[in-house]
Amino acid sequence: MSNAPESVPAATIHLRAAGCSLLVLADDDRLPRIRHWGADLGEQSSAGAAGIDIVSDPHSHLSGELPASEVSVVTDPTTGWFGRAGLKGSRLGRSWSTSFRTTKVELNGRPVAGFTEGGPGTLRIAAVDDEAALTLHLVIELLDSGLVRLRATLTNDGADFDLDELSLNVPVPSQATEILDFAGRWGMERQAQRHDFTVGTHLRESRRGRTGLDAATVVHAMEPATTFSAGEAWGVHVAWSGNHRHFAEHDSTGVRLLGGGELLLPGELQLATGESYTTPWLYASYGVGLDAVAHRFHNYLRDRPQHVSTDRLVTLNVWEAVYFDHDPERLIALADRAAEVGIERFVLDDGWFGARRNSGAGLGDWTVSADVWPDGLHPLVNAVRSHGMQFGLWFEPEMVNLDSDLARAHPDWIMAARSVLPREQRSQHVLNLSIPECFTAVHDQLVAMIAEYEIDYLKWDHNRDHLEAGLQSAGGAPTEHAQTLAVYQLLDDLKERFPALEIESCAAGGGRIDLGILERTDRVWVSDCIDPLERQRLMRWTGQLLPPELMGSHIGSPRSHTTHRTHDLSFRAATALFGHYGVEWDLGAATEDDLRELADWIAIYKKHRGLINRGNVLRGPDPADNLWLHGVVAGDRSEALYGVAAMSWGAASTPPRARLRGLDAVRRYQVAPIVVGDADRGFTPPRWWDDRTAVVSGAALESVGVQLPNLHPEHSILIHVIAVD
């Protein structure tokens, strides 16, 4: 049984940062409750804070229902809550009902009691259930960005305890009557879905062993008709790269919650006496408009000490140029052409190792194929470096083909829950990195390759979902939790050994995009679909979590490899501009005119990448249903870059105006297009197009805007705005 200290006095903590307030109540008889999370409440008194509630049910004293202010961050049925339980587990069917009492409340390392108010801070709360022999430690933080994050650690003080779930939640107010999150599939990630927040539970679960191509990403609760710039919105994100869940819950009393955590497989976690389990971080972002919700995520990521530089290198990936057909002379010629147009990093994709001449063989054998590369990769690496470019290489360390030396030597290292292997996907299986010998074998191969070639950049892929994720030597016992921790450890080890190494998270495209993987990597591959029409949507909605510099965004071939649409270089290049710029196109097949225009586009990115990679992202207001507007505005509002894309043919014969948000209302700005090449524009430009003398106030640009030309479908323009005073 626990030897916990006596209960502590009640405490009410009000934290404020970046226009956001977090009001937490912690007392001795239950777990802490969040009484307000959202708009800044201003300075409060003890009496004022006591009167603040999310939902007040006047009939709760008659019906016995629980008012919203009494729903704890880990929901507990013993308090009268009849919704989802935050903690689920038992000792062979006993100790399943918990009732925690608080034993410690600290703010920034100091005990607190009564009413306390401050800026951003870290609240740590300890609680015990003596009868259930469990201890719970909670961390609730309000960060400088106004982002809130929560995490819990459960420690077992008694006999073995089988843990089924430990989820956290945050409350949202009654005006949040709509839900927005995302779905998708390969090449069609982050499809927005929006609907009413009705009574019941909106549950999004992933058992794929990765975030998922169909991931919810951020689950929002919103006011009706919320847009990118208007309407209150609250969103949560689970920072975990394995199985996980998000939920939005609305009960009959009016309580509305958003939450989530790791999704544990049956019997996956048994805590022995003294053992602990810590949840992933649950991030929570509030804002007026979806842009403001996104900005809190962006600002948090940009404040990290390991965040990427604004000088993101222009990258060439050769996958769609050569696929598995590796010819050293051809690839060296591609490196030469890449250097000529201003590319700064050359990445060799799949096909360089083992028996990897197609997708059916070689995974797991991370040594250079002597058949294709008789002199190793050194001739290519030397050619790349002779141009001053960095060299990057593709790996898929978590996977194995049955046709590989590794699988033949260690078939027991393959994940399986039964006596037969799971169904194959893309001719491959999953390696169980939680097996120490397997981890070491993969780790040592990667270290050897990185060291021999002084690799600057890894494209880390993950091309199949986990199915029946079990440990063969333990009768198929579930191992998904341990696998995710092993992947994190492998990434952490590589980063520690090679501090300058950059790593890209790719998972059949955008299948592993979460803040857990991004603690250890430097960008994500948004999607395997580089069609610029699809990328307009993909970039728009991936930006709800990530800033541009973390989103791999490449100029594809004239004819898309995934959709078979054909687009002008101007549309492909302008779409890719608002991300980590790169090229995925066979430059050997490009014309001299193509290469000159591509060089111009790359020069534009280099000129503006400081703005793109640190500016505030703005989406909309869209001038029309068929015209999408997005942009980035410098933090001091001295400069901005906007794009307008014609997604389809417009219904109106006269094009509308584009209102440019985010500028300083009283400053004056010069507005000019960014034009590449001298090709026929296909439209009559508006008056401001060629007028470099006119200046316009920020207020006028936001309220009236600029006249657009009549764009053809699947074309776009770029508008550069710079302050002149």
Image: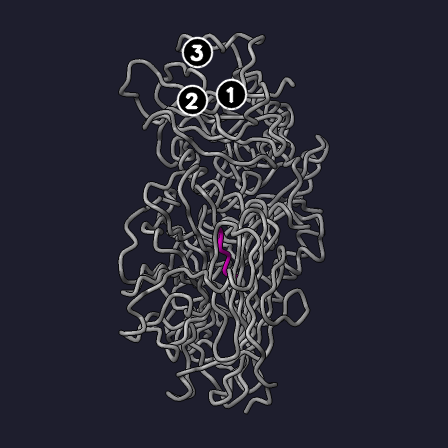
Q: Residue at x 52, y 75 (%)?
A: 27
Q: Quadrant of the N terminus?
A: bottom right
Q: Earlier in the sequence, mark 1 or mark 2?
A: 2
In this picture, which residue range is highlighted in magenta? 280-285
Q: Nearer the viewer, residue 240 or 559?
A: 240
Marker disc for residue 658: 2
Q: Is residue 500 left or right of residue 588?
A: right
SS category of the residue bearing label 2: strand
Q: Residue at x 73, y 32 (%)?
A: 386
Marker disc for residue 719: 1
Marker disc for residue 681: 3
Is residue 646 something that shows in the picture?
yes
Cα separation between marks 3 and 1: 15 Å
Give the answer, above or below, for where 411 lies relative to 630.
Answer: below
Q: Nearer the viewer, residue 661 or 576?
A: 661
Q: Earlier in the sequence, mark 3 or mark 2?
A: 2
Q: Quadrant of the C terminus?
A: top right
**Circle 2 crowding by C-alpha within 10 Å: few under 14, some 14–19, many from 20:** many
Q: Nearer the viewer, mark 3 or mark 2?
A: 2
